[in-house]
Amino acid sequence: MIQIGQHRFRSFSELIYRAALYTAVIIGAVIFGIPFYWMVRTAFMPAWQVYIFPPEWIPAEFHPENFLAPFEVFPFGAWFLNSGLVAVLSTLGAVLSSALVGFSFARLRFPFRDAIFLLVLATIILPEHVRIIPTYLLFAGLGWVDTYLPLIVPKWFAPAFHVFLLRQFFLTIPKEMDDAAFIDGCSPWSLFWRIHVPLSVPALGVVAIFQFNYEWNDFLHPLIYVHQVNDFTIALGLNLFRGQLALNLQDLMAASLLAILPTILLFFLAQRYFVQGIVVSGVKG
Amino acid sequence: MAYTKATQERKSWLPWPRGGNQTMKQTTREAIYGYLFILPWVLGFLIFTVGPMIGTFVISLFDTDFLTKNEFVGFQWYRSMVGDTLVHKAFINTAIYAFVTVPAGTILALMIAVLLNQGIKGQSIWRTVYYLPSIVSGVAVAILWRWLYQPDVGLFNTLLSYVGIQGPRWVFSEEWAMPSIILVALWGAGAPMLIFLAGLQGIPTSLYEAAEIDGAGPITRFFYITIPMLTPTIFFNVVLSIIGSWQVFTQALILTDGGPNNATLTVVLHLYRTGFRNFYFGYASAQAWVLFLVVLVFVALALRSASSWVHYERV
């Protein structure tokens, strides 16, 4: 027995093993984390220090006003709101619709149910980008180009991957729940809405975070459908910003940092449910 | 258990009838609700999947910009593709990207997950650090990485200079541009890692204990318990990764704009340019169909091979 502080190790080889383990984890974490540091460090730097050689690790003086620059040149605040609007409405639709569909596949019985579910699984493997041209034609025909509808509306039709995740989760809820609910005269709708939805908050949260992040980060679809600068999402805006101020790197880094902040905050707020949700929705296959 | 008796005597329709007293009406009503509830997916499937899949094929038979010209050309675009070196380049580049990121990303994610699953202290903090990069994908990340790759004062060449290495010109050089984009993808290994962690937690510890009693070392346990038990998760991640990697777009556009000298021109970037920049929607659709077939072939290969290496037995 080897004792170091309050830790006990059964043997010397176990001590070495634990030491190597922690070293690997720490080195890996530094590698994964260091790009973020470089971003933050550049975002706070004075202009003169950004291109200094050799590069310095710590800003010589802190310039938080770099974070104001994006708002002065562009409707940066509006872009944030636009992205938020699109992401929230898409997420709402994706969660509600795929929960309902997933519930039906997991809990109700109807002819060809499993065959239809196989079809749902099959659509997961269809590359989405293959369909963008006819989809564009459809939305152009509806007069929806230069609105957010092409970004939001398709998400209200139960994205297949979310249906799969939520069905997996609904399968884990004890069947006695349903029986008891029906005895009490519950309709399938209230069984879904009053019982399954409240029990599935972690899984719904996982789907919500996936969808919100996807929407917040999406670039191709806004690029195709949104053309007015004031209507840009944050992804489009950053792309424009980078073209205009190619040399003002500290401002660009500040803008990028602001742009990723909502997804990071959301993750930290929901982290506990998120990880729990991933585990219970059992993506184990 | 209080309602067990009631359950057996129930008169209303039930989703999981066990007794024999269900009537036709009950199952019919359940089926109607079932179909009603999956209606959002069915409609979406028809409007946004089946329709556009057929649409892509039909449009690929036309020379059209949707405005001034609309000419049926049959399979002309598919023939054009055979001799179009730019299209070849796009498919070859994307193939290289996919063939590297799929195995490398999966192995990296698995390694991190296994490390974090060894009863590490502060697991949730480490998990967050590894996972965060994958949730911030997109334009901001591409912009950040372009800055990290800056040849003179960027992070990577700064770090390399500390150990006396003159770094490459990364995204600005033809041979390093594709590896640069692949590295960004590997930075996002946190997403499959999280799924692996969930999978690892599903492996019963009794298996490891039994193996340890039988004298199996950590390496034996890894290859004879962890890997076989994780094969469904590995399969899941590999399939998702194949589909995602063939559609790479944002990084190629922001980091390199397909360059230098088309070294990072990807299929979706090229079809975006062909369609939405140059308005050859027919040609872009033909490329999309070929992309679809390519992805289908690789996913089919993965599915076919699954029976020989994916273990679905439950303990």
Image (cartoon, coloured by chain):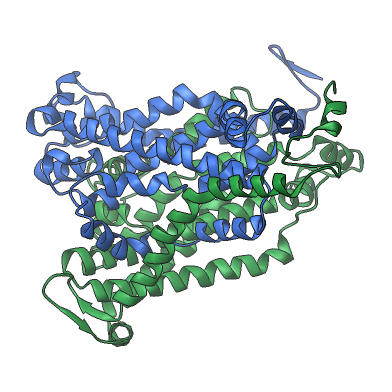
Chain colours: A blue, B green
Residue B67: % across, % down: 13, 70
* Residue B171 position (above or below residue A10): below
State the residue lying farthest toward the right: B214
Task: Choose top left, top right, bottom left or bottom right for residue B96.
Answer: bottom left
Q: Is residue A56 visible?
A: no
Task: Choose top left, top right, bottom left or bottom right for residue B307.
Answer: bottom right
Task: Choose top left, top right, bottom left or bottom right for residue B92.
Answer: bottom left
Left or right of residue A253, residue B36 in this image: right
Q: Nearer the viewer, residue B100 or A157?
A: A157
Q: Nearer the viewer, residue A231 or A32?
A: A231
Residue A192: % across, % down: 59, 33
* Residue A29 position (above or below residue B230): above
Residue B88: % across, % down: 33, 77
Residue in the image at 77% along x and 28% along y: A12
Left or right of residue B55, residue B272 in this image: left
Residue in the image at 22% along x and 36% along y: A54
Residue B153: % across, % down: 23, 41
Residue in the image at 22% along x and 60% along y: A141
Left or right of residue B49, residue A283 in this image: right
Q: Nearer the viewer, residue B300 or A68?
A: B300
* Residue A84 position (above or below residue B248): above
State the residue lying farthest toward the top: A6
Q: Nearer the viewer, residue B278 or A73?
A: B278
Left or right of residue B285, residue A199 in this image: right
